[in-house]
Image: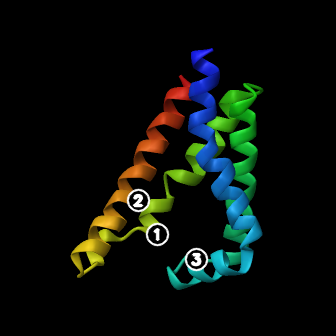
Amino acid sequence: MIQIIGRTLFVIYFILMGSSHLFNFREHAALLGRKGVPLPAAATILTVVMMVGGGVLVLFNWHKWIGAAMLFGIIFPAPFFLHHFWNETESYSRLSEFAHFIKDISLAGAALLLLS
């Protein structure tokens, strides 16, 4: 029971955010473009597939290692492209970007634990 609850709590972020990227595709692709991500529309599609697909695989414990690898593959590089807290001059923006950076790194670590 604990494993089911843990998997659900872990993947809800990925499934909801991936779905949000799909439903707000233009806005998300535009944000990626502003952040300097190459091929922002393709990156948005890849994000949706990896977040939702990986999240579902982990949630249902079906090929969990593939799902965990997908989640790690999308969440580990994300903060290095998106959350440049070191460039922020305003303290709240710096703190917010730092929090997102650390969150993504932590989620990547959790995905790695599922691979063990």
Which kind of residue does numbered mark 3 sit on? Leu
Q: Secondary structure at mark 2?
A: helix
Residue at 48% from the left image edge and 43% from the top image edge: 108
Give neighbour class at mark 3: few <14, some 14-19, many 20+ (Cα, 10 Å). some
Q: Which of the two residues, 38 or 85, is positioned nearer the viewer here?
A: 85
Q: Nearer the viewer, mark 2 or mark 3?
A: 2
Q: Is residue 8 left or right of residue 107?
A: right
Which residue sits at x=44%, y=38%? 109
What residue sits 69% from the left and 28% below the top?
64
Q: Residue type at mark 1?
A: Leu
Disc marking residue 82: 1
Image vertical order of residue 82 relative to residue 110, above or below? below
Q: Is residue 39 visible?
A: no
In the rendered image, which residue does mark 2 sit on? 100
How far across and how far down the image is residue 32, in percent?
58, 76
Query: Looking at the picture, which amino acid does disc 2 mark?
Result: His
Q: Which mark is residue 32?
A: 3
**First in sequence: mark 1 vs mark 3:** 3
